[in-house]
Amino acid sequence: MSASLASIILPVHNQADHIGAVVTEYVDALARTEQPYELILVPNACRDGSVAVCQELADRHSEVRVVASDRSGWGLAVKLGLENARGELLGYTNSARTSGPDLLLLLLYARVYPQIVVKANRKIRESWRRRLGSLLYNLQCRALFDLSNWDINGTPKFFPRSFSKLLSLTRTDDLIDAEFSLVCRRENYPMLEVPIFSTRRHGGRSTMNLRAAVRLYWGAYELSREAKRSAS
């Protein structure tokens, strides 16, 4: 482990057409720091050429590593990346929606506040449907888990390796972010939310639709019941 190394996990799912541009943007942005970092690309159950593109990026950039998985899942990819991370400062982000400047900004905050969870709080959504869906989900999570933070799914997220309970997350799906906030609340890990105003999507199509949203709402409810059973 390196005390100064930052490990940033980037789940990749069928993003062969744009992941190269995304990683290049990240490398260019992070070059402005003087601290070492690694980008861990986690292509998961990709049906296109994402794995090959990721490997080409790793061959081109010494900071990039690839940990591929045949299984799919946002949470699974995050967990796999964390298991293979070598840094003392750990983070993950949605590579389709995070800009290079935003990733750099959150990393700098995490460097300045090394014993705090630092996460993005997206202030703008690209449509009223996404704004409404996000508001309802965040209100639900705040009520179920007694949370004070907003934008549960907001990334980038950074935290120190010493917050070890965040290395034992169990969800392999989209609920891992709700579990992340629940663990921070339960363990009293301090959290700083940084407002983000960009809405640009690098490419691909969002998998969030009505069915996925309902599954997310129901999953949060089930997660709260599990948490209550564990506490009793």
Image: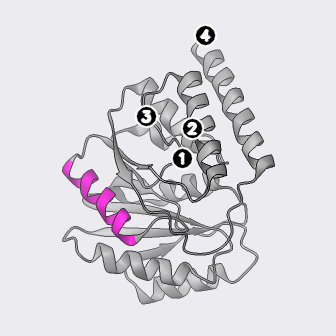
Q: Residues within 10 Å of mark 3 (few under 14, many from 20)?
A: some
Q: Do the CB atoms of the residues marked 2 and 4 lie less than 8 Å apart? A: no
Quarter of image, res 106: bottom left
Inter-mark Cα distance, 3 to 4: 25 Å
Q: Residues within 10 Å of mark 1 (few under 14, many from 20)?
A: many
Inter-mark Cα distance, 3 to 1: 11 Å
Residue in view at x 76 percent, y 76 percent:
47
Quarter of image, res 46: bottom right
Q: Amino acid at mark 3?
A: Asn
Quarter of image, res 218: top right
Which is in the foreground here, disc 2 or disc 1? 1
User: Which residue is label 2 attached to?
Assistant: 178
Q: Is residue 109 magenta?
A: yes
Chain-order first, disc 2 or disc 4: 2
User: Which residue is label 1 attached to?
Assistant: 153
Residue 57 or residue 131, whichever sits in front = 131
Q: Do the CB atoms of the residues marked 3 and 1 lie less than 8 Å apart? A: no
Chain-order first, disc 3 or disc 4: 3
Q: Residues within 10 Å of mark 4 (few under 14, many from 20)?
A: few
Which is in the foreground here, disc 2 or disc 4? 2
Percent across and percent down for residue 197 are: 41, 57
Q: Is residue 11 magenta?
A: no
